[in-house]
Amino acid sequence: MPQYAILIHSPAPADPMDLTPDYVALLERYPAQVEELGGRIVTGFALQPSTTATSIRGDVVTDGPFVEAKEVVAGFFVLEAPDLDVALRIAKLNPATLDGGVEVRPLFVPPAE
C-alpha cells in the first residue's frame, strides 16, 4: 500500500506540552478515524518546540529553525493509504488543521532496476 508523510505545521514554537485537553481528545480519536477510512498510521513523532532547533547551512550553524516563520513543523507521521485521495481525506481530519495545517507528501519509492 502506498505510504505518505504527513507533516504537521503548528504556530511557533509548537510546544507539545501546550496542547489543550480538547486538542488531546481530538488526537486520541484520530487513529480510529484513520482506520475507518482504510488507512494505517505506520509511525509518528512530535518534535520538541522550535526554540530547541539548530540549523546548518553550509558551514554555518545557528540556533533556531531553518527559517523564521509563524508556523513550524511540529511533528510528522507516516501513513499507509490505498491512494492519495484517501490520504488527503485522512489528513483533513487531523486536529492540526484547526490552528495550523498539514502537508501530505508521497514517500519516494526508487524505480525498479
Image (spheres, rainbow, N blue to C red):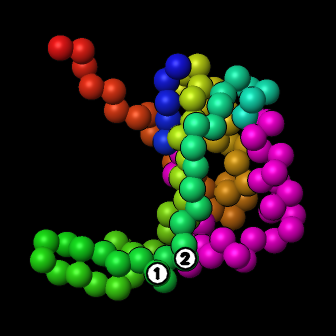
- Residue located at (55% from left, 76% from top): 49
- Residue located at (80% from left, 62% from top): 23
Q: Give the labeled residue for mark 1.
A: 52
From what the image shows, is residue 106 above or below residue 19? Answer: above
Q: Residue 49 vs residue 57: left or right? A: right
SS at mark 2 in the image? loop
Residue 41 in the image: x percent, y percent? Answer: 63, 37
Q: Which residues are magenta?
A: 6-33
Mark 1, residues whose alpha carbon is within 10 Å: few (<14), some, or many (≥20)?
A: few
Mark 2, residues whose alpha carbon is within 10 Å: few (<14), some, or many (≥20)?
A: many
Are discs 1 and 2 less than 8 Å apart at CB? yes
The reply to whether the magenta stretch includes residue 83 is no
Please name the amino acid that badge 1 sits on. Thr
Residue 95, by quadrant, is: bottom right
Quadrant (top left, top right, bottom left, bottom right) of the C terminus:
top left
Q: Residue 60 vs residue 73: left or right? A: left
Q: Give the labeled residue for mark 2.
A: 49
- Residue located at (57% from left, 56% from top): 45
Q: Residue 23 vs residue 71: left or right? A: right
- Residue located at (53% from left, 41% from top): 78
Residue 5 in the image: x percent, y percent? Answer: 49, 42
Residue 98 visible in this rendered orientation of the protein: yes
Residue extending farthest top:
113
| Viewer-side residue, 106 vs 80 | 80
Mark-to-mark CA distance, 1 and 2 = 6 Å
Residue 105, by quadrant, is: top left
Residue 35 in the image: x percent, y percent? Answer: 75, 29
| Viewer-side residue, 69 vs 77 | 77
From what the image shows, is residue 52 above or below residue 112? Answer: below
Residue extending farthest left:
59
Residue 104 in the image: x percent, y percent? Answer: 51, 42
